[in-house]
Image: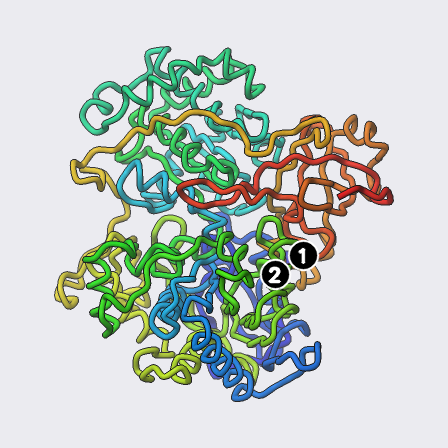
Amino acid sequence: MSAATSTRPADATVGAVDTHCPYCALQCGMTLSPAGRASVRVRPRDPSAGGLCQKGWAAAALLGSPARLTTPLVRDGGALRPASWDEAVGLVARRIKEITADRGPDAVAVFGGGGLTNEKAYLLGKFARVALGTSQVDYNGRFCMSSAAAAAHRAFGLDRGLPFPLTDLEGADAVLLAGANPAETMPPFLSHLRRAMDAGGLIVVDPRRTPTAERAALHLAPVPGTDLALALGIFHAAVADGRLDHGFVGDRTTGFDEAWRVAAAWWPERVERVTGVAAADQRRAAAILAEAASAYVLTARGTEQHSTGVDTVGAWINLALALGLPGRRGSGWGCLTGQGNGQGGREHGQKADQLPGYRRIDDPTARAHVAGVWGVEPSALPGPGRSAFELLDALGTPDGPSALLVFASNPVVSAPHSARVADRLAALDLLVVADIVLSETARAADVVLPITQWAEEDGTLTNLEGRVLLRRRALAPPPGVRTDLEVLHDLAVRLGQPPERFPADPETVFTELRAASEGGPADYSGVTWDRLRAGERLHWPVPAGPAFRRPGHQGTPRLFLDRFAHPDGRARFAAVDHKGPAEPPDEEFPLYAITGRVLQHYQSGAQTRRVEELRAAVPEAYVEVHPDTAERAGLRDGAAAAVVGRRGRVLATVRCVPSMRPDVVFLPFHFPGAQRANLVTNPALDPVSRMPEFKVCAVRLSPAGEREAQ
């Protein structure tokens, strides 16, 4: 594939710049070469690790897109008009002061994103809690990894997506992927699974016959919403067939007996009746994992985005623990993080219940430490606020915020029950959006602030293996565009904060982040930009001791080799049981709808839909459906269909796919307007993680021209 180019001029940066892709949590290395003042050439830095996917190759195209925002916009008479930075930021600061004076600090909320650098995520959380004094801060990562994070913390005492280096997977003889389709979501990842694929050891759990499932030796296709039952069945098979690692379970875990009392009732034949997965295939999966010299169980959004997501991930962790996989070199459990900084983004304070360093906001010791770094009293820090959907759902209500600041997120498209979210945004007294393009959320804003893109700024991110990476600036932003850090600095000063409390220089912010994280579970105190510039591979925790006296710690690429992070050093089995989806099909809505990503697009599509190469490949929403299901609905391949649920109606083009289950339809979630998959998704929340049930809801299918009663 040819290198992507932009029409943006380069700045004084000389020669090629090594940096990282702006998209998924692989954060593939790439080299950007400004060619004169006309284009930017993209090259992969490590072709042997899978190179770049189509999105990565095309990443530079957006730098010169005519859709790029380059001036602030202010709503005037119902329309957005250009404004100066002084006018726009002054208006925001004035309205925030008025709203907080009238209704208190919690009347202003902040919504962040998993694509923000560590420095931005850190300063955004600090801005919310110190400059605004609000507890109402969360981010779109709540929609991504929160269930896996909660399950991992419950099992191991600590959450890091992959608690081992990504390259360890290259030695695996067997890998079970549950709810993951990396062939489309992160294609270079497959290069790490070559050995498992060649050995016939790749197992894929997915209701669809995805491109990843096509590569598997064993594809398990459960009824949507029955993943937990399937995990219990494989766990049962492993124990009943004598594959339990008694030594590991006895020496390094607790809670097996309680977990087994539940799983004992889920023998494979019973599980087959619930999930549709043959009992023989459940036993075969257990055998493949148990007999491999090196085996991994990996989970992703398909297992997490359920109202029982934490327990579902916990069931897969139980299987891994029963086989003795976690905490050993060459085996383990891990989670495939989705967003570019999904890991670091939640570690440093933009999540409602966490402070920097992955500290709990309700822990007095943690509050005292962070307050000391920030120069405020611990009592001044607000407590935990609403989780992401609960925050969005409360906007504009009598007890909810009446102002919202959005950074690096597009909830009008990405949130469940998105019509409800759009209504709540419209009810606000003030909506401020910082973005690089006029996203669907930005179109609804009162003030839009144009900010820099990935290649126009320095900063760090933390990839799916917990490795801290330095993203380098390769070219100057357009005139009139500012960084998120500059925006937060300006706003904080106008709200009365000392200028030095909110620095705009990313390396200065990172130095403060190091101090705030020191001693916490995600300790970055030993990480420095100089070490990252020198090419050191640093996986957190990287402690440095008080006041950074010992900066030479080499990091922790493999967690739990000696002990797990619970006080007794043992991992915990979880006694979890199958409940099923919050909204099963019925006579009125007889089909399961599931959602997911496609190769060419990313998240809400706000960026990738503006890259011609990517947009042309998949220009609009479609619905995958079995041919027989389409025929029963009076539809054929290529027809315009309505996917109708209890909360809304999605318009999409029919794609007849013979491998689809007859009771399932699939919708990609990257498209706006009437094509939003999230018009039908269910906002039912997991009781622990507060993650919505994106992955399954009940719908019916009909020709798009027919009027549907809502």
Count of all numbered marks drawn on residues in the image: 2
Q: Where in the figure is residue 479, as x and y percent of width and height?
A: 56, 85
Q: Where in the figure is residue 516, as x and y percent of width and height?
A: 25, 65
Question: Gap between marks 2 and 1, in whole Å?
Answer: 8 Å
Of callouts 2 and 1, which one flags the residue occurring earlier in the amino acid sequence? 2
Residue corresponding to mark 1: 614
Q: Residues within 10 Å of mark 2 (few under 14, many from 20)?
A: many
Q: Secondary structure at mark 1?
A: helix
Q: Residue at 42%, 46% (x, y): give it.
A: 146
Residue 500 vs residue 377, the one in the foreground: 377
Q: Is residue 199 visible?
A: no
Drawn side of residue 403 relative to residue 655, left or right: left
Residue corresponding to mark 2: 58
Q: Is residue 320 visible?
A: yes
| Mark whose residue sits in front, 2 or 1 | 1
Mark 2 near mark 1, Cβ–Cβ under 8 Å?
Answer: yes
Is residue 519 shown above or below 647? below
Residue 297 vs residue 261, the one in the foreground: 261
Q: Amino acid at mark 1?
A: Leu
Is residue 556 shown above or below 367? above
Q: Quadrant of the N terminus?
A: bottom right
**Quarter of the view holding residue 138:** bottom left
Q: Where in the figure is residue 131, as x and y percent of width and height?
A: 37, 75
Residue 51 vs residue 59, the one in the foreground: 59
**Quarter of the view holding residue 419:** bottom right
